[in-house]
Image (cartoon, rainbow, N blue to C red):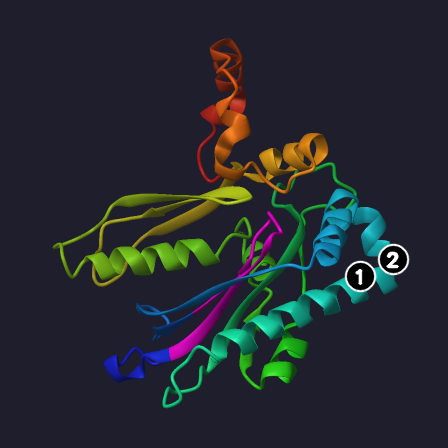
């Protein structure tokens, strides 16, 4: 996008994370580098049947990928849910507002393996369900999608969105400081990720971002299996436990923690 100050345009961002609880949507203004919030945001829970279909695909992605009919049906259902989210959030815009010119569509992740040495039969790849073309057709708005796979093809680990957004937030903080970097931002969703934003130099920043491992996903799986609940609301179940410091110490000795990032 044009970097000119007058080129800030309304854009819709859509996110459906690995917890698969639903779709988060927001409208913001951006020129591709900077952002301004509009305050227009909403969350839309997945239909229980759709969520169960996503979990089935996640738990056995190899079988799912070989079932063409199931793949297409679930992908279309996820796209339909995102289309409905777009229409709903557009209704929140003032009547005299400029129509969004772009939708950022993450899709629903069912498999993600950035390690080249993986033993998975699917190999090093990332799979997100949802059709950018169908979403564009349904909303009459241009769609940017398939960003995880593009990032991995470029040598990344398939987590390109959060680092760019975090860098824009840090840049926005520069208005209050001479330089808001270097900074590290940690985002804990179903999977946790980290962004390092370096000190500003010549209007550019060194940005490094990567997934760091499980976030809430393991706890969510535990809650569904043992308590028939989608998540640990308010951390009430976790609060009843006791920390096993010996176990934590043994885990921290794993070679993983001595590796250089990204990891």
Residue 106 sits in quarter: bottom right
Residue 140 in view: yes
- Residue 105 x, y percent position in the rendering: 56, 68
Locate residue 20 relative to residue 94 in the image: left or right. Answer: right
Residue positioned 47% across, 45% down in the render: 210
- The front one of 4 and 89 is 89
- The front one of 235 and 103 is 235
User: In this view, which residue lies farthest toward the top?
Assistant: 246
Where does label 2 land, which residue? 67
- Residue 194 x, y percent position in the rendering: 42, 43
Residue positioned 64% across, 84% down in the render: 137
> Quick check: 240 above or below 247?
below
Q: What whole-number distance in Å separates the C-alpha atoms at marks 2 and 1?
A: 6 Å
Residue positioned 57% across, 71% down in the render: 85
Look at the image and give the residue range highlighted in magenta: 10-26
Locate residue 248 relative to residue 199 in the image: left or right. Answer: right
User: In this view, which residue lies farthest toward the bottom?
Assistant: 96
Q: Secondary structure at mark 2?
A: loop
Find out whether the residues at labels 2 and 1 contact each other: C-beta distance under 8 Å.
yes
Q: Residues within 10 Å of mark 2 (few under 14, many from 20)?
A: few
From the image, give the main secondary structure of the stretch colored magenta: strand
- Residue 235 x, y percent position in the rendering: 49, 33
Q: Secondary structure at mark 1?
A: helix
**Marker disc for residue 71:** 1
Q: Number of marks in the image?
A: 2
> Quick check: 120 above or below 168?
above
Residue 40 sits in quarter: bottom left
Q: Residues within 10 Å of mark 1 (few under 14, many from 20)?
A: some
- Residue 75 x, y percent position in the rendering: 73, 65
Residue positioned 44% across, 37% down in the render: 261
| Residue 22 lies within the magenta run | yes
């Amino acid at each position: 996008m044009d970097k000119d100050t007058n080129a800030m345009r309304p854009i819709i961002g859509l996110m459906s994370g690995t917890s698969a609880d639903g779709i988060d949507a927001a409208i913001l203004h951006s020129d591709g580098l900077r952002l301004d919030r509009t305050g227009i945001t909403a969350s839309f829970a997945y239909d229980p049947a759709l969520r169960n279909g996503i979990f089935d695909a996640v738990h056995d992605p190899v079988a799912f990928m070989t079932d063409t009919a199931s793949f297409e049906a679930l992908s279309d259902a996820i796209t339909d849910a995102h289309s409905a989210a777009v229409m709903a959030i557009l209704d929140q815009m003032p009547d005299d507002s400029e129509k969004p010119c772009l939708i950022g569509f993450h899709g629903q992740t069912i498999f993600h393996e950035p390690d080249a040495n993986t033993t998975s039969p699917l190999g090093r790849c990332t799979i997100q369900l949802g059709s950018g073309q169908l979403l564009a057709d349904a909303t009459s708005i241009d769609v940017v999608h398939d960003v995880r796979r593009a990032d991995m093809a470029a040598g990344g680990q398939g987590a390109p969105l959060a680092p760019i957004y975090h860098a824009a937030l840090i840049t926005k903080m520069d208005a209050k400081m001479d330089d808001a970097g270097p900074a590290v931002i940690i985002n804990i969703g179903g999977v946790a990720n980290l962004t390092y934003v370096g000190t500003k130099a010549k209007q550019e920043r060194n940005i490094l971002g990567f997934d760091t491992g499980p976030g809430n996903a393991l706890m969510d799986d535990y809650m569904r299996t043992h308590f028939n609940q989608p998540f640990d609301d308010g951390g009430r179940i976790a609060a009843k436990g006791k920390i096993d410091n010996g176990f934590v110490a043994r885990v921290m000795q794993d070679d993983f923690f001595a590796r250089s990032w990204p990891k």
